[in-house]
Image (cartoon, rainbow, N blue to C red):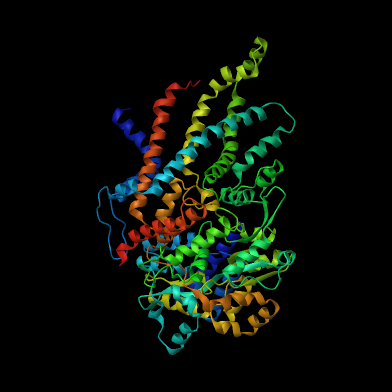
């Protein structure tokens, strides 16, 4: 077949997917970038070109910086903790123990439940006085805390919910990966007398690396995407102490109806996520050993 | 889910049939949110069916559209895309936002006969306030509420107080609250005297305090606020002091959603919350409770709240006429009375309190009348141009003061600066 014809053929095959990708991903992204350089249109006042004014506004906006800082801590804590937890859970339910199916199911349960519903339940866990968490703490003589109403505790409280929600989901990937590992590694290690920790560190962990990369990227994206529980539990309060970037973006876009500024915030969020993607392709991929 | 599909299919089939049978029928879409418990969808669907039967030239299609916030997102997005619904129930405080976006038509445009004019005058004036500016009425009161005080009569008795006398003043709130606050051996509070929620939308509850202290938060034109008025700062100081100085109110920000539960669990002897919680508390309280007007400072005072009926500008004249007729039909005294009984919302006109149904209900359950009796003291809910942003400035300030991050004076000064910046374009 002629080379040119083959290319056309290939592109024709790609076309349907390409149309969707352009229509629902690239076109909106570029449209948002353009909107971020315009003012917000109101009744009787069309949008005008304002250059980088929306971005300058962002630099002076304390709520934006607060949300960004919160998001940084949110990511920094949720990602490693949920990954560590998910590996531990996967290792445990991978062993042949009684009630294994039940354990697997209960770890996976948080993932299946809708976030809006569980956030409403978590509000009651965190309630001062008679909430579940405070009741348990009071058994140990710890005074009741206002988890969602204290600016120094609220971010930690919503992080815990995020970890609880995510760890089970990541566990499934690790569990699947563990089950594809060749059982002869384990036998060999046992014959050589390697400890469980040594076996994990030298054999399982390196072999799980591709899974870890996948999970890591997902966790990073989720850290910027998970805001359902913020909307239900705190609405970003008290005084923006639990506001995350996407939550703030939603407020600006769909409560304040400030299209220009919301577009600029979206552009920043897109840039952060693009960086995360690039990090995966150019740095982590090279250091990972795929079989 | 399945039910929804079946219902949707039934509606679709119904639409096709009616379209074929009466080609001249005018379609009137009606978006409504749900913010309280109870079978609201069923009630509204019933209204539409009955209205369509009585008015064969119209076909009202009710669409349940989520929370208030989800509803305004849906209708404003649709408006921007050029195809808004004919009518919707939205927060009365969003009137400025809707008008600024050019989304709604003033109700005055449809008021033509003397009967129409009489109808528009039939509402409680306090409920019309939030829908009026520029000498026009933009929204019709429909599901409206106000803040009231609930008190636990049993805990009052245990504390040696008269169970039938709730606090009437700010000073009494403190003296009674001190008797009602209980601590365990290690000094942890097990029962709070009073609790006023402050998560999400603290401005609404705060407006109770500020009004009672003689402060008015925003002007009627919606382009200036007085967050840093000394009377407003003083009101905030009182709220903060309930916890910090007097120790009778939980510290920090108190969750709105769990406050009724706290009351039912006897963790709070008195709470402030919406009249909309009346049915919920009535059916779940295992003790005697009372409902009262908020205690007075300089005067009594409470904001109104809830949703108005809006008609959209881009709908055709025939559709708008249908929506207007539906609004009048919905707010007839008998219907408004039944709606109030079913939901706990305050009936929107004095005439509905004169109906047999509501009179009988109130005789069985007198607390249902407290909200109405408080209405003469009620003020418009805080609402301005760029409303949600200007309100957020206040919310952030209130939460900063309640959590101790800022002094009340500083918090209100910062909120004022932010609000001035936001409102400068509307002078």
User: Seen from this angle, which residue lies furthest bottom?
Assistant: B114
Whether B333 is drawn above or below A250: the answer is below
Point 48% across, 20% down: residue: A289
Where is the C terminus of chain B found, in terms of image quarters?
bottom left
Q: Position of residue B372 (x, y in %)?
A: 57, 77
Q: Please tell me which residue lies in front, A138 or A21.
A: A138
Where is the N terminus of chain B found, in terms of image quarters?
bottom right
Q: Position of residue A107 (x, y in %)?
A: 64, 37
Quarter of the figure with residue B336: bottom right
Whether B127 is drawn above or below A123: the answer is below
Q: Please tell me which residue lies in front, B304 or B169.
A: B169
Q: Is residue A269 visible?
A: yes
Q: Is residue B37 visible?
A: no
Q: Position of residue A83 (x, y in %)?
A: 55, 32
Whether A209 is drawn above or below B396: the answer is above
Q: Please tell me which residue lies in front, B2 or B193.
A: B193
User: Seen from this angle, which residue lies furthest top?
Assistant: A192
User: In the image, is B85 to the left or to the right of A42?
Assistant: right
Q: Position of residue B134 (x, y in %)?
A: 35, 75
User: In the image, is A171 to the left or to the right of B387?
Assistant: right
Q: Please tell me which residue lies in front, B90 or B166.
A: B166
């Amino acid at each position: 077949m002629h080379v040119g014809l083959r290319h056309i053929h290939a592109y024709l095959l790609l076309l349907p997917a390409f149309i969707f990708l352009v229509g629902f991903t690239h076109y909106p992204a570029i449209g948002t970038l353009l909107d971020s350089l315009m003012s917000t249109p109101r009744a009787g006042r069309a949008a005008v070109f304002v250059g980088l004014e929306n971005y300058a506004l962002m630099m002076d906006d304390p709520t934006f910086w607060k949300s960004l800082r919160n998001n940084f801590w949110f990511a920094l804590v949720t990602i490693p903790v949920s990954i560590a937890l998910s590996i531990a859970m996967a290792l445990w339910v991978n062993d042949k123990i009684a009630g294994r199916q039940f354990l697997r199911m209960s770890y996976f349960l948080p993932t299946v439940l809708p976030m809006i519903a569980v956030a409403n339940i978590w509000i009651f866990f965190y309630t001062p006085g008679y909430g579940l968490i405070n009741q348990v703490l009071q058994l140990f003589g710890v005074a009741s805390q206002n988890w969602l109403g204290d600016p120094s505790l609220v971010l930690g409280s919503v992080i815990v919910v995020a970890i609880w929600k995510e760890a089970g989901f990541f566990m499934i990937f690790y569990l699947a990966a563990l089950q594809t590992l060749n059982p002869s590694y384990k036998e060999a290690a046992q014959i050589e007398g390697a400890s469980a920790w040594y076996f994990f560190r030298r054999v399982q962990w390196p072999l799980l690396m591709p899974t870890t990369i996948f999970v890591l990227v997902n966790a990073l994206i989720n850290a910027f995407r998970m805001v359902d529980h913020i909307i239900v539990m705190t609405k970003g309060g008290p005084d923006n102490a639990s506001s995350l970037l996407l939550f703030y973006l939603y407020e600006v876009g769909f409560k304040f109806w400030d299209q220009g500024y919301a577009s600029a915030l979206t552009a920043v969020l897109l840039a952060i996520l693009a960086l995360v993607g690039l990090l995966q392709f150019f740095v982590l991929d090279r250091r990972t050993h795929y079989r | 889910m399945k039910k929804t599909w079946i219902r949707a299919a039934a509606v679709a089939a119904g639409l096709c049939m009616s379209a074929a049978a009466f080609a001249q029928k005018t379609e009137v879409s009606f978006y409504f949110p749900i913010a309280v418990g109870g079978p609201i969808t069923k009630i509204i669907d019933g209204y539409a069916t009955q209205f369509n039967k009585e008015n064969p030239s119209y076909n009202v299609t009710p669409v349940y559209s989520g929370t208030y916030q989800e509803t305004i997102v849906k209708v404003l997005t649709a408006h921007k895309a050029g195809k808004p619904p004919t009518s919707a129930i939205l927060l009365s405080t969003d009137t400025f936002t809707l008008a600024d976006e050019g989304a709604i038509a003033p109700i005055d445009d449809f008021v033509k006969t003397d009967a129409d004019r009489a109808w528009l005058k039939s509402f409680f004036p306090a409920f019309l306030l939030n829908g009026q500016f520029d000498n026009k009425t933009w929204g019709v009161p429909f599901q409206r509420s106000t803040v009231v005080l609930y008190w636990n009569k049993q805990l009052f008795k245990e504390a040696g107080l008269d169970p039938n006398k709730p606090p009437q003043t700010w000073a009494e709130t403190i003296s009674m609250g001190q008797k009602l606050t209980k601590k365990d051996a290690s000094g942890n509070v097990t029962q709070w005297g009073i609790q006023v929620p402050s998560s999400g939308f603290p401005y609404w509850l705060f407006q109770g305090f500020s009004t009672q202290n003689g402060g008015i938060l925003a002007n009627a034109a919606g382009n200036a606020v007085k967050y840093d008025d000394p009377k407003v700062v003083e009101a905030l100081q009182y709220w903060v002091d309930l916890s910090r100085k007097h120790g009778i109110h939980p510290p920090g920000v108190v969750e709105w959603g769990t406050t009724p539960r706290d009351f039912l669990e006897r963790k709070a002897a008195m709470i402030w919350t919406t009249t909309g919680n009346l049915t919920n508390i009535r059916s779940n309280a295992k003790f005697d409770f009372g409902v009262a007007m908020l205690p007075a400072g300089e005067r009594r005072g409470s904001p109104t709240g809830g949703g108005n009926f809006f008609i959209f500008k881009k709908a055709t004249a025939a559709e708008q006429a249908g929506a207007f007729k539906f609004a009048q039909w919905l707010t007839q005294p008998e219907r408004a009375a039944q709606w109030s009984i079913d939901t706990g919302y305050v009936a929107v006109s004095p005439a509905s309190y004169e109906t047999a149904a509501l009179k009988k209900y109130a005789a069985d359950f007198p607390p249902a009348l407290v909200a109405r009796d408080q209405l003469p003291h009620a003020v418009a809910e805080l609402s301005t141009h760029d409303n949600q942003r200007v309100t957020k400035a206040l919310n952030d300030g209130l939460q900063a003061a309640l959590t101790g991050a800022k002094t009340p004076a500083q918090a209100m000064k910062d909120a004022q600066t932010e609000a001035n910046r936001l409102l400068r374009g509307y002078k």
